[in-house]
Image (cartoon, helix red, strand yellow):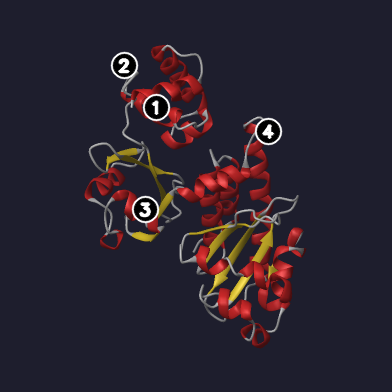
Amino acid sequence: MSRRPSDLAARLLAMHQASGFDALLALTIETLEAHIECDWASVSYAPARPGAPRRFWSAMQREQERVCSPAVEFAREHPMWLAWWSSLADEPTDMTRVVDEGELHSTDIYNTVLRPLHIRRMIGQCMPGGIDFAVGVIRDRPVEFSDEDLRIVHLVSKHLTLSLERLVERRGGRFDVRGEVERLHRHAYIRLTPEGRILAATPEAGALLGCDLRLGLPQDVLAWLMQGAGQPLVRARSSRAEVLISAIAPRLPGDGKGLHLMVVPCGDGRPRSVPALTQREREVSRWLAAGKSNAEIGMILGISAATAKKHVERILRKAGVENRTAFAALVLDGR
């Protein structure tokens, strides 16, 4: 595993340049896993507001949602969990430096949450500045984390905070973190080796692709990957349904890591009431009708927000409507 400072600097810079929320989370997880010897890394969203959604992402995609949901119940009774979610605003915490391992193994939180997730060693840090995210690195073996590991977690957490703030600034202060979390949670993800072998996948991915991912990726998806996956792949599920597959976090040159694929349903494709659209305009129109912003369309299709804006303007002119709302209504009426 490469831990060169230049590699870490390049990954942190890539986080700041991430085109969207999806890519930023994937880059954060890959940065942690590339520079800390761990079994897996995670990013979680756990706001303190009553009734707010709690979400958990990692490349492993075990049953985190089901297993982690009881964690809130036990948070009040265990010092490690209190440290992780409250006093970690400024510094990361190593679980085994907070509580004795024998004591930890006798607790409900270990037996209900940590053990089912194969967590024996863990560093966690909440995001500073009131942002409801936390990052973590996990080992399923009794090997202690080093002070350097703690430093890297702290550094990545700070850069994730700054990168989220940049996303807000780029969208004119209108970035809806909770909305992005919910949108991201509805999508399906696949993590691959550089050779195209599946490392992990969310359960929704196989359902959307209409195949058993335990047997590998469909041949057309593999062929798309072999061609570089430079543009998103639209794949038919039935006579009227399609899914769009995008590479949301292309690997850095020479890092030996694979990439993440995002799989989302995109309806039946071409808006029937809008004639004479080019292939690219049809791709843009799917997401325009779905209410996506220019920046989001650009991220999904691998083009700049400015290019997406030009496509949107041409589509609206061809449709004879003045705004996005009217276009969405036109498409719905035409279908």
How far across and down, in percent of the image, does residue 93 sit? 70, 68
Does the CB distance between marks 2 and 4 fall below 8 Å? no
Residue 330 can be seen, yes or no: yes
**Between disc 4 and disc 3, whose residue precedes?**
4
The three-letter amino acid code for the residue at tag 3 is Ala
Tag 2 secondary structure: loop
Give me the disc on residue 205: 3
Q: Tell me the residue at 42%/51% (across/down).
A: 188
Give me the disc on residue 50: none
Tag 4 secondary structure: loop
Q: CA distance from mark 4 to mark 3?
A: 32 Å
Nearer the camera: disc 2 or disc 4: 2
Q: Is residue 48 above or below residue 119?
A: above
**Between disc 2 and disc 1, whose residue precedes?**
2
The three-letter amino acid code for the residue at tag 1 is Leu
**Between disc 2 and disc 3, whose residue precedes?**
3
Does the CB distance between marks 2 and 3 fall below 8 Å? no
The three-letter amino acid code for the residue at tag 4 is Gly
